[in-house]
Amino acid sequence: MFTPAPWPADRLATIDDAAAAPVLVDARAPERFRGDVEPVDPRAGHVPGAVNLPVAGNTDDEGRFLPPDDLAARYAAAGVRPGVGAVVSCGSGVTACHDLLALERAGVHDARLWPGSWSQWSADPARPVVTGS
């Protein structure tokens, strides 16, 4: 039986943690990451240095998570491995949780969630924004 529990505080990242992360994963759809469209936030684009790994790539055609080895290979290709200290983001921190579950399945148990994600970053005009791939 599943028993809900609060997310551990040490697994949450701040905006400054995200800016300094060895790997910052952005789980949003590619068109939002590139800045082609932005239906929610004040600015379009992504955090400099972020890698785009949309959550849709974590599942098969039936919507089930890929096998652990496939997920591990997907994330490793972007530099995410155990011990790296990856931070995962999206628009507002919700979709990033899907990536965190996929990372857990892949054996990466130390990735952190940045709850503020793109909404927090794009709302601060002092933070740089990158568009394109």
Image: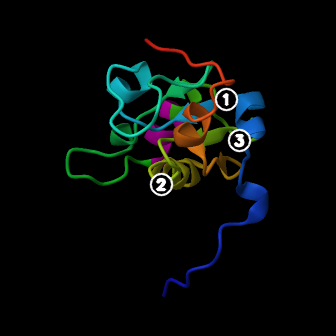
Front disc: 3 or 2 = 2
Closer to the N terminus: mark 3 or mark 2?
3
Give how far apart the Cα atoms at labels 2 and 1 are.
Answer: 19 Å
Q: Residue at x 49, y 41 (%)?
A: 90
Mark carried by residue 94: 2
Element carrying mark 3: loop
Element class at badge 2: loop
Give the foreground label among 1 and 3.
1
Q: Amino acid at mark 1?
A: Val
Say which amino acid is labelled 3: Pro
Please give left or right for residue 76 compared with residue 35 in the image: right
| Residue indicated by mark 1 | 23
Between 36 and 54, the one nearer to me in the picture: 36
What scheme was used to colour the molecule?
rainbow
In the displayed structure, 94 sits above or below 123; it is: below
Q: Which residue is mark 3?
A: 82
Counting residues from the start of the chain, the first of labels 2 and 1 encountered is: 1
Which residue appears at 53% of the width and 41% of the height?
Answer: 119
Give coordinates of residue 37: x percent, y percent.
32, 25
